Image (cartoon, grey):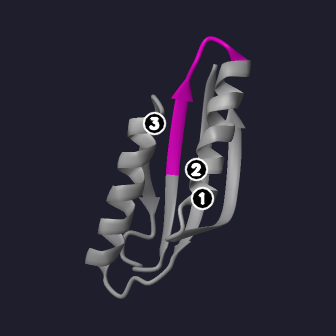
Amino acid sequence: MIVYLEIECFIYDTHSLKQKRSVLKRFMHRIRQSFNVSISELDYQDLWQRTLLGIAHVSSDKVHAEKVLQEIVKLTDSFSELEVTNKQIEWL
């Protein structure tokens, strides 16, 4: 079972691409540390207040994958420097 989560975010208090990269690096490191997932910035690399992240998780158990997904969404919502503007979930 593969679950794919796409999250579009607005990044607060960034005024340059360097600041954006710093915020995203911190966020992505926290996600990777907490969960066994792959995460990458997919779009808006040239915009300093917007990003599109793709997160993928592979599991043999759908219940476990759903739990991991809920925890990722909860962590994303609690990260104060990001505001989720759109999210899509796809099961493969």
Residue carrying label 1: 78
Name the amino acid type tagged 3.
Ser
Look at the numbered discs 2 and 1 and tell me whether their residues touch, using CB distance below 8 Å.
yes
Look at the numbered discs 2 and 3 and tell me whether their residues touch, using CB distance below 8 Å.
yes
Query: Of 30 and 45, which appears nearest the observer?
Result: 30
Q: In 3D space, how far apart are the residues under numbered discs 2 and 3 (Cα atoms)?
A: 9 Å
Secondary structure under the numbered disc 2 in the rendered image: helix
Mark yes or no: residue 92 visible. Answer: no
Residue carrying label 2: 75
- Tell me which numbered mark, 1 or 3, is placed earlier along the sequence: 3
Q: In 3D space, how far apart are the residues under numbered discs 1 and 3 (Cα atoms)?
A: 14 Å
Judge whether 23 appears above or below 41 on screen: below
Q: Indicate the position of residue 62 as horizontal and vertical percent values.
A: 71, 19
What residue is rendered at 62% in x and 31% in y?
68
Highlighted range, magenta? 54-62
Give residue 48's mark: none
Give residue 34's mark: 3
Q: Residues within 10 Å of mark 2 (few under 14, many from 20)?
A: some
